[in-house]
Image (tube, rainbow, N blue to C red):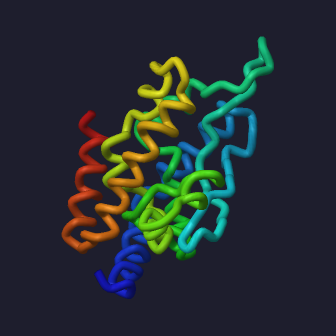
Amino acid sequence: MKPIIKRFFDISFSFFTLLLFFWLIFLTWFLAMIDTRSNGIFTQERIGQFGKGFKIYKLRTIQIATNTGTLQISRIGRFLRNYKLDELPQLINVLKGEMSVVGPRPDIVGYYDLLEGENRKILELKPGLTSLASLKYYNEDELLEKQVSPLEYNDKIIFPDKVKLNLEYYYNQSFSGDLKVILATFKLMFYR
């Protein structure tokens, strides 16, 4: 797919989605703000296209437990995560050109930036709101919670599989393929 067509689609999709769902973004931001007793927005450094860092926007879903002082997912935060509503502010990242609608999910430092050989081709892509890998691992949090060693399971099983799926996307990008990923994402969000 030509980069100019993908960029035009990204701008159009994110602009109209923001217009259409502004009320939902505002409502979920307000709920996140009350639930986490914070400003409701979470920013974090992620690895973007060509390995450059950028700040990703999300709704805050973590709060400090009043009885233990530890970090935990809030009640409303779990709902936002289950339906991926916490990621709606990333439409701003798409408008800014830091992300695309479809592409590898942006990861934290220490993963994509350390890829070698052919796997580094993933870094030529803009990170996306959704991808083949995010569809397969839609319930990643639940999957990791069941593991004895979640970090080891992620590093040895999930992450290598995501790299494989993202390389598959790299070599087979198409507008119709992107539309299929977007439709599959909406199905997961609304019919799970």
Percent x, y for residue 174? 24, 73
Q: Is residue 61 left or right of residue 191?
A: right
Vertical comparison of 81 with 187: above or below: above
> In the image shown, does 135 or 76 lie closer to the viewer?
135
Q: Which residue sits at x=35%, y=54%?
A: 164
Based on the displayed image, in which of its 4 quarters is residue 57 positioned? bottom right
Q: Is residue 95 left or right of residue 69?
A: left
Q: Which residue sits at x=50%, y=68%?
A: 123
> In the image shown, does 26 or 118 lie closer to the viewer?
118
> Total of numbered circles in the picture?
0
Percent x, y for residue 128? 44, 62
Q: Is residue 108 left or right of residue 21?
A: right
Question: What is the residue that sits farthest to the top in this orientation?
Answer: 67
Taking the image as drawn, is residue 80 in sight? no
Q: Is residue 181 left or right of residue 27?
A: left
Task: Classify the position of the N terminus by image quarter.
Answer: bottom left
Q: Which residue sits at x=64%, y=52%?
A: 110
Percent x, y for residue 185? 30, 50
Q: Which residue sits at x=57%, y=52%?
A: 111
Based on the displayed image, in which of its 4 quarters is residue 100 positioned? bottom left
Vertical comparison of 71 with 159: above or below: above
Percent x, y for residue 160? 42, 47
Vertical comparison of 143 with 168: above or below: above
Taking the image as drawn, is residue 112 in sight? yes
Task: Classify the position of the C terminus by image quarter.
Answer: top left
Based on the displayed image, in which of its 4 quarters is residue 140 positioned? top left
